[in-house]
Image (cartoon, rainbow, N blue to C red):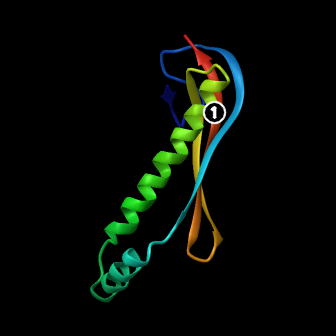
Amino acid sequence: MIIVTTDFVPGKEIKELKGFVRGSTVQSKHIGKDIMAGLKTIVGGEIKEYTEMMDEARQQAIGRLVEDAQRKGANAVIALRLETSNVMQNASEIMAYGTAVYVE
C-alpha cells in the first residue's frame, strides 16, 4: 500500500477514486508510565515512554486505515492526515484519514 501526504503519487496515475478511509485507536496512559513521566518532568527532557506509546498508536491507526483502503480495493492512500484529541481524562484518540485510490 502506497501512503502519501500529497494529493498525488509521484510517477503514478490515479485511475480510480475509492473514497474516504480512516483508522483510529484510543490510547490510555499507563500508571507505570505516569510515574516515570512524573519523574522526568523534574529533570526535563523527552518522555520516551509517551513517545513510544504515541508512535504505537499512530502505527495502529495507520494500519486500520490501510485495512479500510484494502477493503475498498485501493492500492494507495493520498492526502494522509493524522489528528489527535483527548476523549477523556488520561486517554487520547489518534485518527488517521485520507483518500483511497487505485493507481498505475
Q: Residue furthest bottom?
A: 42
Circle 1 residues within 10 Å: few <14, some 14–19, many ≥20: some
Q: Residue at x 27, y 86 (%)?
A: 43
Q: How many marks?
A: 1
Up/down of 21 relative to 90, above or below: above
Residue 85 visible: yes
Q: Which residue matches tag 1?
A: 68
Where is residue 22? Give x, y as percent. 65, 41
Q: For the residue labelled by badge 1, is the local secondary structure a helix, a strand or a loop?
A: helix
Residue 38 picture location, percent across and down = 37, 85
At x 63%, y 33%, the residue is: 68
Question: Does 55 sit above or below residue 64?
Answer: below
The answer to whether residue 95 of the structure is visible from this angle is: no
Name the outermost residue toward the left: 43
Direction from residue 47 to residue 2 in the image, left or right: right
Q: Quadrant of residue 93?
A: bottom right
Along the line of sight, the residue nearer the viewer: 60 or 76: 60
Depth check: give the residue in front, 72 or 20. 72
Q: Residue 3, image x and y in percent?
A: 51, 31
Q: Is residue 45 left or right of residue 22?
A: left
Q: Residue at x 60, y 36 (%)?
A: 79
Q: In this view, does 2 lie above or below 54?
A: above
The amino acid at mark 1 is Asp
Task: Tell me the quarter of the picture where residue 69 sits.
Answer: top right
Taking depth in this image into account, of 14 and 77 the one nearest to the observer is: 77
Write the residue at 55% across / 33% down.
Answer: 66
> Image quadrant of residue 88?
bottom right
Task: Estimate the x, y position of residue 78 in percent, counting from the top left.
Answer: 59, 31
Q: Quick one: quadrant of the C terminus? A: top right
